[in-house]
Amino acid sequence: MFNIYYEERSLPTLHLNRVSQAIAFLPNLVNGVVKSKNDVAYATNVYYGTDFKNGTLADYSNDWAILKLNKPIGKKYGYLGWKSLPSSTLVGDTNKFALVGYSGDFPNPKKKGYENLTAGESMTAGVHLECSILRHQDNLLYHNCDTNHGASGGAIISNINGKYYILALHSGSNEVNGLLLNRAVEMSRLDEWLQGN
């Protein structure tokens, strides 16, 4: 949802195996409805960190994508920048992070307060407040934010000196010894890519 990049300068394009004919970004999608269809933006270029051919944890540490959009919708809706911080400053049971994304289990119209959200699961953004990044291992951050299918790519954000920044991107979960472990990509991976391009 937030891993969107708009810039006027030209960047090299890495070609995908024809994932889709068109990728649309729907700003402020609520209950499956966009406030203005004129604000829908389309990806003109897609950049990504891995194609998952190796099937290793290294693939997950580079599980990110950046879309260059055909219009600067951030000028109207605003945008979140990202910030690369050392893992030592992120890790700990701090409850200072939030995961924002389009998990497949939200909204649930059977829950009180959500009865009017009827467009279908994952058609409205959800947020888990006060979660933590618990450890850093194998170039991945592990967190306890609530996730479900569809949450991949969701932004893990926090307030730093009065401004919100994306500090990691949720990249999936796996079960180890009966425990569900949530993985996240460090923003430094995207910084490394930008510096090389």
Image: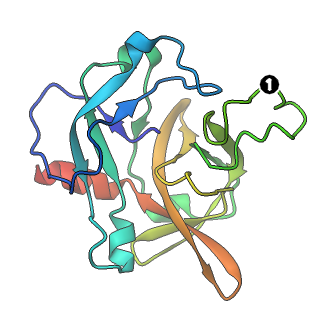
Quarter of the rendering containing residue 16: bottom left
Of residues 186 and 27, the one nearer the viewer is 27
Q: How is the image coloured?
A: rainbow
- Residue 133 picture location, percent across and down: 59, 62
Q: Which residue is mark 1?
A: 116
In this figure, what is the number of numbered marks? 1
> Is 102 situated above or below 10?
below
How packed mark 1 is, by other alpha carbons closer than 10 Å (few <14, some 14-19, many 20 or more), is few
Q: In the image, is 14 to the left or to the right of 46?
A: left
Residue 134 shows in the view: yes
> Is 62 situated above or below 75?
below
- Residue 84 picture location, percent across and down: 38, 51
Q: Amino acid at mark 1?
A: Asn
Of residues 146 and 158, the one nearer the viewer is 146
Q: Considering the numbered disc 1 on the image, is that residue within a helix, a strand or a loop?
A: loop
- Residue 70 picture location, percent across and down: 24, 23
Residue shown at 15%/52% (left/top)? Answer: 15
- Residue 155 picture location, percent across and down: 51, 45
Residue shown at 26%/59% (left/top)? Answer: 49
Of residues 82 and 5, the one nearer the viewer is 5
Quarter of the rendering containing residue 181: bottom right
Residue shown at 11%/49% (left/top)? Answer: 197
